[in-house]
Amino acid sequence: MSKFISTYVKIVDKTCERVGRFVMYWVFFMMFLLILSFVTRNIINYPLMWIIEMAQFTITAYYLLGGGYSMITDDHVRMDLFYGKLSEKGKAKMDIFTSFFLIFYLVLLFAGSITSLVYTIETKQKLFTAWAPYVWPIKTLMLVGILLMLLQAFSTLFKDFAKLKEKNI
């Protein structure tokens, strides 16, 4: 593989790994919020209206920002009807074939998230709840998460081509 592609793969993999490892611990923050919600609602009898939405925002950011990392560690969901029986080259061919669908989907998702974020910022969009938080922070994290996953999809595609040609990146 070319020096550019090799550098791209290393940078994207390292970035997605660091972001994924950082975001991995957000699940504890979300658990804290849910426990706090239980305590304030059922024990203290003073429900906080923002907790559940903040937990939803946290879990949304958690799975969106962790998408690239799950691709690196190969922890994403895969229909394994016959994939597991394929050789390494066969798996690489199958991954290359399906990567084009994934990349197409992520490009559409990324374009949609850009327009959604622009709309949210222009209209100062808020949720229609009692707390009424602004939506732009979570939409920004959504955009970043989709971008990281798109970049990681290309990185994985390059690695699959390298497997097919039996070269290291």
Image (cartoon, grey):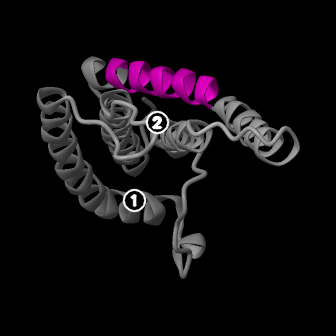
**84 relative position to 117: left or right:** right
* SS class, disc 1: helix
Task: State yes or no: residue 164 in magenta.
Answer: no
Quarter where residue 130 is shown: top left
Q: Which mark is residue 130?
A: none
Residue drawn at 59 percent across, 75 percent down: 85
> Which residue is nearer to you in this view: 113 or 44?
44
- Which x, y percent locates residue 50? 56, 36
Query: In the picture, residue 93 is in which quadrant?
Result: bottom left
Q: Residues within 10 Å of mark 2 (few under 14, many from 20)?
A: few
Q: Quadrant of residue 113?
A: top left
- The residue that mark 1 highlights is 95
Q: Residues within 10 Å of mark 1 (few under 14, many from 20)?
A: some
* Residue underneath mark 2: 131
Spatial CA span between label 2 and label 1: 44 Å
Amino acid type of disc 1?
Answer: Asp
Task: Identify the residue at horizontal 39%, vertical 59% (top origin).
Answer: 95
Q: Position of residue 148 (x, y in %)?
A: 37, 32
Q: Earlier in the sequence, mark 2 or mark 1?
A: 1
Task: Please state if 23 lies on the left or on the right of 122 as rendered.
Answer: right
Which amino acid type is shown beneath numbered disc 2? Trp
Q: Nearer the viewer, residue 7 or 45?
A: 45
Magenta includes 9?
yes
Q: Which residues are magenta?
A: 7-23
